[in-house]
Structure formats: structure tokens, C-alpha cells
Amino acid sequence: MMTTLRAFTCDDLFKFNNMVSLIPVCQYGIPFYLQYLAHWPEYFIVAEAPGGELMGYIMGKAEGSVAREEWHGHVTALSVAPEFRRLGLAAKLMEMLEEISERKGGFFVDLFVRVSNQVAVNMYKQLGYSVYRTVIEYYSASNGEPDEDAYDMRKALSRDTEKKSIIPLPHPVRPEDIE
């Protein structure tokens, strides 16, 4: 199947029907997506099937201090529709975000993932990411469930020649302690 990887457009917000469960528009809201599109358009990429349906997407941003060697690419969301999983799309989208972060002079790429999401954790490890730290109660729960911890996973880029950005922290941190 021929897949097109291209920049996200505003029209794509209306193509999310096959991905509704994957795209937490309710969680983020359309203004959130538009803000990313306005500030970091190069970090917002979709995978499109020949028929025009969305297969998946990645959105992220560049952030952090250059002086403290913390300038990096951040993966805000990565999603692939169920019928298009196990085709390597997530890996390709991650690779594109990493290349953009390299071009922008990032030291690393990071992302947050639920500790319980072992499928995603393993996938990110296969892509070269490692757990940098645990963030306590990063994800707010609903239905009276306890909040869930996140792993902050990182992959060093070529600018971090000594791989200092991925040396794991020995102790967990709280959400208010992360920048």
C-alpha cells in the first residue's frame, strides 16, 4: 500500500473519523491542535492512505534551554489507526520527528508514556529510547482511579556526543518539577 507522509493541515481535523478513539480531541480540544500547527508546523505530520483516510499522525515541538544543553524535540502525541498498525508507520513518523529535531540542533528527543502501556514502552525501546526518569502521577485518572505515573523516555541525537541527556535520574520526580 502506498502511504503518503505529509504536513498536517487544518482540513485534517475533519478527517479524524476513523481515529476518533485515538485522537483525544476532547482531551486537548481543537485550539490545542491549531496552536501546535501554528507554532511547530514541521512537527505535525500525518500518514495518509491512497483513499485519503488518515492512517496516523505525530505532533511535537522544539523546546528547552540551549545554554543548559536541554534544547530538544518533544513528541506530544503519536497515533496510528487500528487497521494500519504493525506496518512500521509509528517508527517512520518517529524517525521523521527525530530528523527534524536533528536539523534544529536538538540534543535529544523525549516523550512521556504511561508506565502501564507496555506495548508502547517496548516499541520506543526498540526505536532506541530509554527511560530517563519516572514522573509521579503525571496522568490524571477519571472514575476515581488513582493517577498514573509516566516514563519520560529519551533518545540522544548526534549533538549530544557524550549522551549526557539520557543518563537516567536515580529518583522519580513530580509533574511540577519538570520543565
Image (cartoon, rainbow, N blue to C red):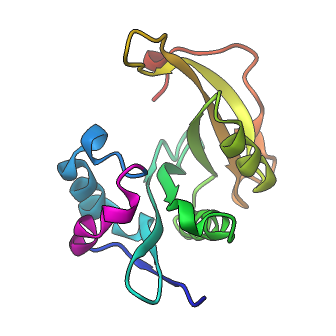
Q: Residue 4 in the image: state x and y as whole percent.
A: 49, 85
For residue 16, side relative to residue 115 (left or right)? left
Q: Residue at x 47, y 19 (%)?
A: 175
Q: Residue 106 in the image: state x and y as whole percent.
A: 58, 56
70 or 119, which lies in front? 119
Please identify the quadrant where the C terminus is shown: top left
99 or 23, which lies in front? 23
Look at the picture and state if 171 lies above or below 169.
above
Does residue 9 belong to the magenta stretch?
no
Q: Residue at x 46, y 12 (%)?
A: 145
Q: Main secondary structure of the magenta part?
A: helix
Look at the picture and state if 120 lies above or below 128.
above
Magenta-drawn segment: 10-21
Please identify the quadrant where the N terminus is shown: bottom right
Give the farthest residue toward the left: 31
For residue 127, side relative to residue 56 (left or right)? right
Query: Looking at the image, how many numbered discs can be counted on the residues?
Result: 0
173 or 104, which lies in front? 173
Q: Residue 70 in the image: state x and y as whole percent.
A: 56, 42
Corner quadrant of residue 166: top right
Look at the picture and state if 56 lies above or below 150.
below
